Structures are given as structure tokens and as C-alpha cells.
């Protein structure tokens, strides 16, 4: 049984009203399961009142799907509190899109590209050399702090930067590439200890696991030429898409906050709620650590993009100029006065006039929405829908759990996927156990494990959340 044909629905769960835009052909049982997970994730109105807080609005996007402790595809506005468990440990996870200049899709077919991508991402070739001052600047001041430092000294891959272009790219970042904070979390003190010694970073510049990826493809359809020109895209443009987050930084903030909340909760309290007024120390520490992690995620995607462009340059035997289209997190909280907007697997999608001094000021905020491997990526324009909290889906949304996908899906022979291990390597002859595990992990991300991307994009366009800009067809995917 599928959901009703209308795409906008209103539900009442756990004492809260939920507004939803539902994917086309969404099975009703999946939607109901997701709502049940959301009911468990949301504090009761009584628990919020106890913390001098209230839930102002909750919406779900068409990629809404079950998840523990929180389903994916949820946006919530809280007054007077933050819910760290709503974001979890993948803090700052988001998307980055780059257009490569003077590169054609045909040039990506060279097997040299596979070699260089594997070397740079999985065989120690990234060469991200950072000083303690660089690390401190990243966590405290985001990408602007890093670029300011690199004007003084840089080594390795960062020495190749065109800094003037990268400064110009900052206006193509959500929040200009920085989440403000009061300080660096004490848990990161050793990592951010200030010194002038360059060391190769073992954390930043790595893709991570799960559904994180790097993908190279080309624009095969332009739906909005005006927006596409502002983004620097045209039919046939080669595009790099990065999906990754804050790695160990978000993991530490999420885990430590949960432990502190539980330890300091009084009997009968919902420890998941951190009150601005009643728990100011815990609240502020979380928000600072959260900002540190989001800043690390901005830097992580920045470095991943540089490494992928470097792989293309080495494969082609020349330098490759590139320009940012947009970079934004979709697993983050935004604080505005007493209101904290939580986006769990949901993109900011502000409308015309919201992004002052940006190339997109009068076009709407770019939304980068990937499908599964092989299904491509849509670049969309936000419409600033207040009914849906100026947000949009962040992906196609899972149709099958990872375990279900392992047993029910197959990998298309046409997919070109680069991972840490080359399954064709002679060293794996006789190790069918390793080859089988590689294939099983790929099945978890197979197209059949996800909703078709257009079943998510179409209802958002019909509901006035976004408009279509350009569709990117993938040619090569890098998975951790």
C-alpha cells in the first residue's frame, strides 16, 4: 500500500504536529515506521516545559526514512534548548560541488585517474600538511582562518592553492565557511596546540565511511540556465561532488555530550534536552564543540576537493582550474536568538534575497541533492518555504536497510567505483572472503537500496520547496 497521492501531510505524534512532504510512491508502512522513530526521538511537551523550552515546529522532507535514535530527513525549531541527539555524531556532514574548467567528460575515462584517486585517498598520497596554528584556525575560525594562515606559509598539496580564487569561493559557502564559537573544546586542545611545525594530517582530507563519497560526472541537463550561469555550469561541464563530514571531531562531540547529559540529569528529566537557561554551561560547551566540528567538516570537504582535483590534474598531466559551486552542511544546528534550528539529514534551502553579497542573492540558495551511486545528483535552488522551515531533502533517502541491501541488491557492471582495495589486484587472488566483503559494502549503497532521486525532487518542486537547476550524471565514484 502506498501513501496517498497528495504530497503534503500533517501528523500528530508525541503531542507534536508534524508537517511532511512525502516522496512519490512512498510505501505507507515506511512512512509510518519513520514517524514512529520520530515519536521516540522527540521529547514530550512536558519534558520540554520542565527545561523552559518548547518545540516550535517540526517538518520532514521526502527522503524521510527510519533511523535510530533519530530518523533522517527532519527539521525542528526549538526555543530555549538544543537537542544534540537529533544531530548525532556526524556533525557538519554536508555536500560540496566544484566545476572543473577545461576538462571534458571523455578525459575522465583514462584508467590513470583510477590509479591517482586510489593513491591520493587511500595510499598515503593526500599530503595535507598543517601546522598547529592551521589546526587551531580551522576549529576556531573555519575556512577564513585557514586561508589567512596559508597566506603566510604552506606546504604539500596546499602550496598549490590559488588563494585569491579560494578567498572568492567563500561567498559560495553556507555561512561563509565558518560557524562562530567562543573557544575550542578542551577535548581538541592537543590537536589544536599552536606551533609552526608542518605535519601531515591523518584525519582531515579523508572521505569516511557509510554513504560518504567523492564523485566525478558531467552536467547532462540544465533546467534553469540563469541559475546555472551564476553557478558556473553549462551542459557538459565536468563536476566534482563531495559528501563527507567532521569525522572524529563530530564523533567526539556527540559521544561526550551524551555522556555529560546523562551524568548530570536529575531524576525524571529528559537528559537529551540541553536548556539555554537551566544548563547554560552544558549548552554552551555543546554549541562550541558543535561549531568546532562543523568548521572541521568545512575544511575536510575543502581538502577532499583539492585532492580529487589533484588526481584529475595528474591523470591529465596538467594543472586543472576549478571553481566552487556551493558547500553546505545538512546535519547541523543553527542558532538564532532563542531559536535553534536542527537539520538532521536536511539541507538549508533559503530563497531569493536571503544570501546577501553572494552570487546567489537573487536566485535562492543552492541545494546539492545526490542520489545513489549511478543515479546522479541534482543541483536545486531553494525557495525559502517558511512552511517547511527553509529546508529541503539532502539525498534520495534509503529504501532498504544496509543489511537488507546486502541480500537483496546487485551492483551494476557499469558502475566505476574506487575503494581502498582494488578487487582486481593480483594480491587478492585466493581471498574471496575479502572480495565478497567489498561487494557486500557496495551493495549497501547500490541504486536499488535508495529511492529514485526524481521521486524525492519532484514532490519538493510541487510543494514549493525548491526548483530544478541542473542534473549531473556520474562517471566515477570514490568510496571509503
Image (cartoon, helix red, strand yellow):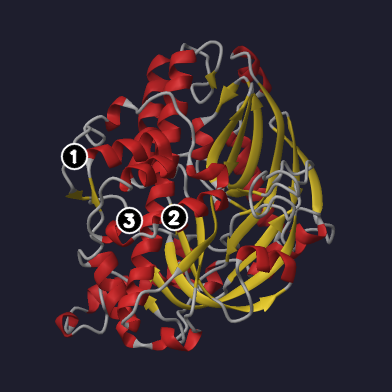
The image position of residue 203, as x and y in percent, is 27, 50
Name the residue rendered at 47%, 89% in the picture: 106
Q: Position of residue 13 (x, y in %)?
A: 71, 35
Considering depth in this image, is 121 or 135 the residue closer to the camera?
135
Which of discs 1 and 3 lies nearer the camera? The answer is 1
Answer with mark 2 or mark 3, whichever residue precedes in sequence: 2
Left or right of 469, for residue 329? left
Q: Residue at x 43, y 23 (%)?
A: 182
Question: Is 399 rendered above or below residue 33?
Answer: below
Q: Quadrant of the image for the C terminus?
A: bottom left
Q: Which mark is residue 164?
A: 2
Q: CA distance from mark 2 to mark 3?
A: 21 Å
Q: Which mark is first along the chain, 3 or 1?
A: 1
176 versus 271 height, above or below = below
Which disc is residue 278 wearing? Answer: none
Q: Secondary structure at mark 1?
A: loop
Mark 1 lies on residue: 196
| Number of callouts | 3
Q: Which residue is mark 3?
A: 205
Identity of the residue drawn at 35% across and 83% down:
316
Where is residue 353, by image quadrant? top right
The quarter of the rendered structure image containing the N terminus is: bottom right
In terms of depth relative to the viewer, which is nearer, 131 or 467? 131
Percent position (x, y) of residue 242? 46, 62
Choose between 217 and 374: the one closer to the eye: 217
Q: Secondary structure at mark 2?
A: helix
| Mark 3 nearby-residue class (10 Å; few <14, some 14–19, many ≥20) | many
Q: Nearer the viewer, mark 2 or mark 3?
A: 2
The residue shown at (63%, 23%) is 337
Nearest to viewer (mark 2 / mark 1)? 2
Can residue 70 be seen in this snapshot?
no
In the rendered image of this protein, does residue 339 appear above or below residue 1? above
Amino acid at each position: 500500500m502506498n501513501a496517498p497521492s497528495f504530497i503534503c501531510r500533517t501528523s500528530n505524534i508525541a503531542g507534536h504536529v508534524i508537517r511532511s512532504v512525502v516522496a512519490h510512491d512512498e510505501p505507507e508502512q515506511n512512512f509510518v515506521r519513520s514517524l514512529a522513530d520520530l515519536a521516540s526521538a522527540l521529547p514530550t511537551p512536558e519534558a520540554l516545559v520542565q527545561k523552559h523550552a518548547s518545540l516550535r515546529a517540526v517538518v520532514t522532507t521526502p527522503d524521510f526514512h527510519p533511523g535510530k535514535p533519530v530518523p533522517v530527513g527532519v527539521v525542528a525549531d526549538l526555543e530555549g534548548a538544543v537537542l544534540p541527539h537529533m544531530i548525532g555524531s556526524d556533525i557538519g556532514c554536508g555536500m560540496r560541488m566544484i566545476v572543473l574548467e577545461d576538462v571534458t567528460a571523455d578525459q575522465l575515462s583514462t584508467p590513470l585517474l583510477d590509479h591517482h584517486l586510489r593513491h591520493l585517498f587511500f595510499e598515503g598520497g593526500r599530503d595535507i600538511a598543517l601546522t598547529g596554528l592551521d589546526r587551531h584556525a580551522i576549529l576556531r575560525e573555519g575556512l577564513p582562518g585557514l586561508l589567512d594562515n596559508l597566506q603566510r606559509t604552506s606546504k604539500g598539496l596546499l602550496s598549490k592553492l590559488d588563494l585569491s580564487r579560494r578567498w572568492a569561493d567563500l561567498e559560495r559557502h553556507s555561512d561563509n565557511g565558518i560557524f562562530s564559537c567562543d573557544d575550542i573544546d578542551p577535548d581538541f586542545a592537543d590537536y589544536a596546540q599552536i606551533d609552526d611545525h608542518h605535519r601531515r594530517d591523518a584525519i582531515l582530507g579523508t572521505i569516511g565511511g557509510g554513504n560518504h563519497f567523492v564523485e566525478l560526472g558531467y552536467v547532462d541537463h540544465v533546467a534553469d540556465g540563469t541559475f546555472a550561469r551564476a553557478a558556473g555550469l553549462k551542459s557538459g561541464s565536468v563536476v566534482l561532488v563531495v559528501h563527507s563530514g567532521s569525522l572524529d571531531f563530530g564523533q567526539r562531540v556527540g559521544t561526550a555530550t551524551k555522556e555529560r547529559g546523562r551524568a548530570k540529569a536529575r531524576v525524571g528529566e529528559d537528559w537529551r534536552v540541553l536548556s539555554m537557561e537551566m544548563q547554560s554551561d552544558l549548552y554552551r560547551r555543546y554549541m562550541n564543540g558543535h561549531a568546532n566540528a562543523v568548521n572541521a567538516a568545512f575544511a575536510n570537504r575543502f581538502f577532499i576537493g583539492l585532492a580529487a582535483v589533484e588526481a584529475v590534474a595528474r591523470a591529465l598531466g596538467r594543472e586543472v582550474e576549478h571553481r566552487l559551486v556551493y558547500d553546505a552542511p545538512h546535519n547541523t544546528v543553527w542558532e538564532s536568538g532563542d531559536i535553534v534550528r536542527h537539520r538532521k539529514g536536511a539541507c538549508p534551502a533559503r530563497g531569493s534575497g536571503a544570501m546577501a553579497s553572494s552570487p546567489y542573492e537573487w536566485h535562492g540558495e543552492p541545494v546539492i541533492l545526490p542520489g545513489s551511486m549511478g543515479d546522479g545528483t541534482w543541483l536545486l535552488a531553494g525557495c525559502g518555504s517558511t512552511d517547511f522551515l527553509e529546508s529541503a531533502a539532502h539525498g534520495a533517502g534509503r529504501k532498504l536497510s544496509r543489511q537488507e541491501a546486502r541480500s537483496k541488491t546487485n551492483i551494476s557492471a557499469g558502475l566505476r567505483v574506487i575503494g581502498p582495495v582494488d578487487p582486481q589486484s593480483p594480491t587478492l587472488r585466493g581471498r574471496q572472503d575479502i572480495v565478497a566483503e567489498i561487494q557486500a559494502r557496495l551493495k549497501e549503497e547500490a541504486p536499488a537500496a535508495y529511492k529514485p532521486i526524481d521521486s524525492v525532487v519532484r514532490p519538493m518542486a510541487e510543494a514549493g520547496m525548491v526548483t530544478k537547476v541542473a542534473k549531473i550524471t556520474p562517471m566515477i565514484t570514490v568510496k571509503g
